[in-house]
Each structure stands twice: as C-alpha cells, then as structure tokens.
Amino acid sequence: MASQAHSQRYVLILLAAVFIAVWFGNLDYRKLVRPDEGRYAEIAREIAMSSDWITPRLNGIKYFEKPPLQYWATAAAYRAFGEHEWTARLWPAVTGFAGIMLVFFAGRSLFGFTAGFYASLILASSAGYVATAHFNSLDMGLTFFVTATLLAYMLAQRPEATPAMNRRWTLAAWAAAALAMLSKGLIGVVIPAAVLAIYIVLQRDFARLRGLHWGMGLTVFLLIAAPWFVLVQLANPEFAKFFFVHEHFERYLTTVHRRAEPWWFFFPILALGILPWLTLVPQALAHAWRVQGQPSAFQPGRFLAIGLAFIFVFFSASSSKLPGYLLPMLPLLALLIGGVLAGTRPRELIWHLLPILLFASLVAVLSPCVVTLARRPELVPLYEASVPWIAAGAVCAFIGAGITLHYCRRDNVTAALSAMAIGSLLAIQFVTTGHNALAPNYSGHHLAELIKPHLEASVPVYSVRTYDQTLPFYIKRTVTLVAFRDEMAYGLEREPWLWLPDLPSFERAWRSERNALAIMEPDTHAELEKNGLPMQVIGRDMRRIVVRKPDA
C-alpha cells in the first residue's frame, strides 16, 4: 500500500513538471501585440524607469483607467530580470498557474482530493483560461484574486473549521478582495460581495453576515487597498472622478468605450472558453444545486452556481463587453465539473469524448481556411504561416482524446482525464504560439527594428495620427502624439503640452527640428508630401511608414 502511494506521488510530481514546462515554455516566443499587451508592458516599463509608483503613465501621459497592482508586479520583474516579452507576461502566467493550485487546494478541502485534482486538471486545460494566462492583460490577475476571495470564504464556512480557522480564512478573503480591487477596480469587490449577498438572501441564512469579522476584515481591506488610492488622489486631484465615475459607472452603463455587443455575446465566449469540457457543464450545474448534508449547512455547490450566474448576467447586462470579463467563471466551473467527474464511471466519459474527437478532426482539416480571415492580400502569407500551428494543436487534442478513450476502456478515470488535460493544454499552447506568425501586423517590433539605427537620445519621435501600443516598449522611450488622443484624451487634457493637436502644429515642429523621426500611415504621408514637408522614408511595415528629417 505504501509502495502504491509512493508511486502515485511520483506520477503526480511528473505530471506537475510536465504542466509547468508546457505552461511557462512559450512566454518569450511571441512578440507583444496591440493594444493590451503593449499598453500594460509600457506602463510598467515607465514605472520601473521613473520610480514613480503612484501615478501610472502610458507614453508619458497620466493613465488612470486601471489600478496599479499588475503594473507594480511587472515593473518589479523588469528590474529583477530585464525588459523582455516573458517578463511582461510573467504576472498573468504566474497568477494563472497559482489559480490552478488554488482550485486544487480548495477543491480538495471542500469536495475531496479527487474532485480537487480533477478540477485543477480541467482549469489547467480550459481554452479561455490557458490563452488568457499567456496574454498580457489584467483579467488573469483579477480572476485569481476574485477566486481567492470566494474560495477563502468557502473554506471559512466548512463544518470542520474551528473559530480560529474561520477567522483566518475570512480575513484572507478580505485581503484577497483588497488585492482584487488593486488589480482592476471596484469589480474586484462587487463580484464576491454580490455573490455572498445573493446566497444569503436565497438561503435565508442572514446569520452569516455576523461571521464576516467586519472590524478586523475592513481594517485588513483598507490597510491593503486604501494607501494607493489616497496617495494617487493627493498627487492627482482629478483622479477620483475619472476612475470611479468614468471608468466604472459610465463604462458599465453607456457605450462610451465603444464595446457594445449583443445580449447573446457571452454564450459562445463561454462555450469556447471551457473547451474541451463543455459537454459536462449542464450536468455540473444541475449537480451544484442539490442540497448536500443538512439544509441549514453552508452549500458550496450552490454558492459556486450563484457566482457563475451573477458573473454571466452582470456582464451580459453591461453596455461594455469584452471576452475576458467572463474569465472569473472558469475556476468556479472547473470546481463544479471536478465534483461531477469524481463520481463518474469511466465509460460514461466516452460519450463526452466523441464531440471532442469530431471537433479536433474538423479543426485539423479546416485549419487552412483561417487564411480567409486575412482582410488584405498582404496578410495572406501571415495567416498561411499560422496554419501549421493550428493543425498541430488540433492533432494534440485528437491524440489526447484518443488516449483518454483508451484509459476509459481500462476503467482508469485519473489517467484518462490527465491525458485529456495534457492534450488540450498542448493544443492551446500550439495555437497561441502560432499567433506570432501574425506579429508583423499586430506588433510594433518590426517597426522598432527599423527605427533603432536612427534613434539617439536627442532625436524626437512623432507618432502622427496613429499610435502603436507596443512601439514605446520596443524602442524603450515614449513618442510625441500628433492629432491622436484615443484613451489618452483625459491625460492630455490635463497636460496638453505633451502632444501636438493637429498637422499644422506638427509641420511647424518638424521644420524646426535638426533631426527627427516620425511614424504615420500611408494616407497621412501622402498628405504631408503634398504639403511639401521634407521627409525621407527609412522603412515601412504592413501598416505604417517611418520617415526622418533629411539632412539640410
């Protein structure tokens, strides 16, 4: 018996090593793409360079759209390891992997070892979760801390939790909520607070409000979350109105950010995000609502189901929709599916494998059709270069499902699910890595390589009627915006000397410079040529032209 347990431990260690290697192995392969990856990489670079940890700046301009926790973490990674693509993506990758460990630990404590282990496999191989963890955005950090808040509260409610354990886990939930707020704002508090409130009302379990340790909890929350908000407000009196009113209420209630989508937008997003485990979702949701134990006891399944429903309905009702908004649903779904699979017989899984085998086969066969997504003829070679990666991903998924089928027939659920998870993780990583083939159209790296030979400290760089979010990161300096504001409009209203508002202003500045560089689109270049502006083309990428001021 001891020998079997020893063997199982080695298998788990080997499985974890495989997942870690595949998870972190491609962080530095892809170039950063616009807009999110470039934006958040650059804000952190400017913090690391300036040592101003209070006022975030994008391209040297005040940027108050989001709180700073991820900026701080990435800036610290830059200082420790240098400015690279992998350090820019390190925080999402680390918090994503930590989320898998969190789901395993909490699932084991709440539903048993097997359910927790299966839940971690499911989360580590869900398409939306894996892809987001390898993309530099704020969604993964928020998801980790929201999940930590909800699961810490659930751990505090376990029947076997002593008063001391209840207090520690409840305070951990308060701390995680504070970090969630520092990750992406009020939504980090709204989600767990609303889930708990709805649960209490539906279960008529109002006594749980008294167990939140309000005094100590609020103290912990404010000690973590409040200092930055106070300091940034003192340094920038305009912060509070913009951050809380414009970036929260107006974003949710209006289409000011031009992200309006139809009411059904999140249905396909969720279906794709939970692949390859989609067919298990209805069974997991039905199982979640069953009363477990005494009716008066805390019902973790119902709590998770309420969390899923609230997140989906809340963001579906919003006037601003982005795919990443649903990411906090995936850890909760993984826990519910893991609980169902813990009681599933091996041969029952076979019916869930057939759609996966069919889907993987179709993707492999139809992968060349991705070329039809190219909107311009010059993009066709880029999409063609991504086809082998997509096909390789489909093959991994197919092989993983095939091995899973083999182990199902041998009545080995753990081996079957492990094979499925590894195949799915490899498939997603291949497809994600293959996106680098499109980098010439979505990244400023190529443009930066054209600029660097002409770049000196005293040479100004103008970005005329355009702004590539990734370019400042790659040239390691900011650019002067010309006739372009977009998301930097608010900061430019406060510091208007940081940009040039129109082409005549740019022409005057250009003529007065001894040496200068500028990036623009072909139409703008043609217009300035017609105006007789002296420019020498030194390079171009698929969307823009780089010019320098000719020698007199």
Image: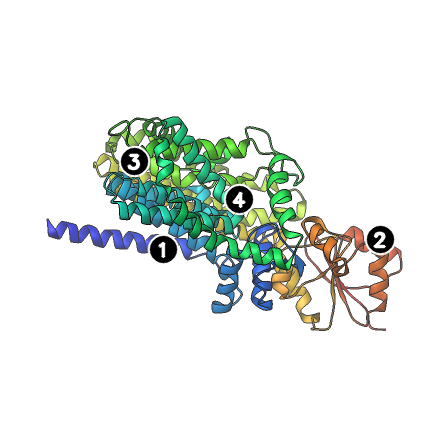
> Callout 3: few (<14), some (14-19), or many (20+) C-alpha neighbours within 10 Å?
many
Above or below, comparing residue 404 to residue 222 in the picture: above
Q: Is residue 159 visible?
A: yes
Q: Which amino acid does label 1 sit on?
A: Ile
Q: Earlier in the sequence, mark 1 or mark 4?
A: 1
**Would you say 138 lies left or right of 112 here?**
right
Marks 4 & 3, CB-CB < 8 Å contact: no
Which residue is the site of mark 1? 20
Above or below, comparing residue 355 to residue 75 in the picture: above
Q: Residue at x 24, y 40 (%)?
A: 112
Under tag 3, what secondary structure?
helix
> Which of labels 4 and 2 is toward the front?
4
> Callout 2: few (<14), some (14-19), or many (20+) C-alpha neighbours within 10 Å?
few
The answer for how far apart the CA atoms under marks 1 and 3 are is: 24 Å
Image-quadrant location for residue 507: bottom right
Q: Earlier in the sequence, mark 4 or mark 2?
A: 4
Under tag 2, what secondary structure?
helix
Q: Which amino acid does label 3 sit on?
A: Gly
Q: Is residue 354 visible?
A: no
Which residue is the site of mark 3? 339
Give the number of the disc on residue 186: 4
**Residue sitting nearer the eye, 530 or 87:** 87
Q: Tell me residue 256's x, y (percent).
A: 67, 39
Which residue is the site of mark 2? 527
